[in-house]
Image: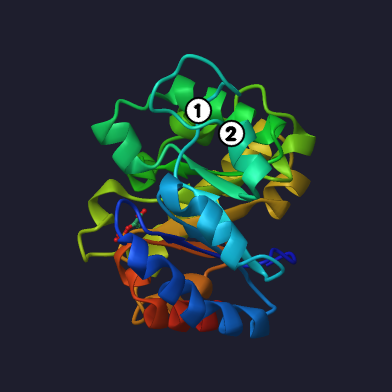
């Protein structure tokens, strides 16, 4: 896979109570230390992030935010500053998750602004695409140009792209218990990689990590990692159990 490091991301969404956070990390931290062949990140609610950073300090576990605003500061009640996230030690930020797009009117334009702001602040964006890319099967790539991908990355330089990962999540697979088949997911990941080569160049496309998300579990995870263009997984429900998340990290190695 052209030396791309696997990335395993747990998305807690709006789950976990305060008393659940430390015990979860207690379970995974010692094991993450042993698994040196994959990058591992956990995305918690904002109010837990500082605590998560503290508890995982000095470890290989990275902490992720689930969203961040495009401005560093200002009159944006309820929003989260990417600059502040970086300052407290957060590493990754998810941008444009399907639930943000569907439930909170996240537009392609905002995804683009947020991705740029994250990069400017030294955060690593994981840009989520939720289009059903397989619907484009048979169409010429330059006709499609994978709308969300192109819009999300507008104005982002090749150098900045070194810190960007793409997550492909078919809408119908998120939280549904019905994952895409490994072949379907690979087809879309390959399409995304080809589109990156079109937008930038083949080298950059070969370096960019592409994750699959949507009802990943311990039964199907290995089939995704076997695919040439899938470099990681974004896991919601199955990652709420720390032991299951550890099993998924093991599968990534
Ligand atoms: C997600 O949160 O993006 C996700 C893929 O959730 P689940 O694994 O529960 O489908």
Q: Earlier in the sequence, mark 1 or mark 2?
A: 1
Q: Residues within 10 Å of mark 1 (few under 14, many from 20)?
A: many
Image spot of residue 104 (x, y percent): 29, 30
- Callout 2 secondary element: helix
Residue drawn at (33%, 41%), measured in percent from left and top? Answer: 98
Look at the image and tell me in which quarter the C terminus lies. Answer: bottom right
Look at the image and tell me in which quarter the N terminus lies. Answer: bottom right
Does the residue at mark 1 contact the one at mark 2 (Cβ under 8 Å)? Answer: yes
Q: Is residue 123 left or right of residue 11?
A: right
The answer to which quarter of the image holds residue 108 is: top left
- Callout 1 secondary element: loop
Residue found at the very far top of the displayed protein: 75
Image spot of residue 223 (x, y percent): 43, 76
Q: Residues within 10 Å of mark 2 (few under 14, many from 20)?
A: many
Per the image, the residue denoted by label 2 is 82
Up/down of 7 relative to 85, above or below: below
Q: Quadrant of ligand 1?
A: bottom left
Q: Is residue 24 left or right of residue 197?
A: left
Per the image, the residue denoted by label 1 is 69
Using the numbered discs, state the Cα–Cα distance from disc 1 to disc 2 in whole angstroms.
6 Å
Residue drawn at (22%, 64%), measured in percent from left and top? Answer: 178
| Residue toward you, 158 or 244 | 244
Image spot of residue 13 (x, y percent): 34, 52
- Is residue 146 visible in the rendered image? The answer is no
């Amino acid at each position: 896979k052209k030396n791309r490091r696997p990335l395993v991301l747990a998305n807690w969404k709006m789950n976990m109570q305060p008393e659940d956070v430390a015990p979860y990390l207690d379970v995974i931290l010692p094991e993450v230390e042993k698994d040196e062949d994959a990058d591992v990140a956990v995305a918690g609610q904002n109010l837990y992030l500082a605590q998560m950073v503290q508890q995982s300090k000095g470890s290989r576990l990275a902490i992720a935010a689930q969203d961040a605003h495009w401005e560093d500061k200002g009159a944006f009640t309820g929003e989260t500053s990417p600059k502040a996230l970086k300052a407290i030690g957060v590493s990754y930020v998810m941008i444009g998750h399907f639930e943000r797009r569907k439930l909170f009117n996240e537009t392609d334009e905002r995804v683009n602004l947020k991705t740029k702001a994250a990069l400017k602040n030294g955060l690593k964006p994981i840009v989520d695409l939720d289009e059903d890319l397989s619907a484009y099967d048979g169409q010429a790539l330059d006709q499609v140009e994978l709308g969300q991908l192109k819009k999300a990355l507008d104005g982002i330089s090749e150098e900045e792209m070194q810190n960007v990962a793409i997550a492909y999540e078919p809408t119908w697979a998120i939280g549904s218990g019905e994952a895409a088949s490994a072949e379907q997911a690979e087809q879309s990941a390959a399409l995304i990689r080809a589109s990156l080569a079109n937008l930038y160049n083949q080298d950059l496309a070969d370096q960019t990590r592409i994750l699959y998300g949507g009802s990943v579990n311990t039964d199907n995870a290995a089939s995704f990692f076997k695919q040439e263009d899938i470099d990681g997984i974004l896991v919601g429900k199955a990652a709420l159990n720390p032991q299951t998340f550890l099993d998924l990290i093991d599968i990534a190695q």
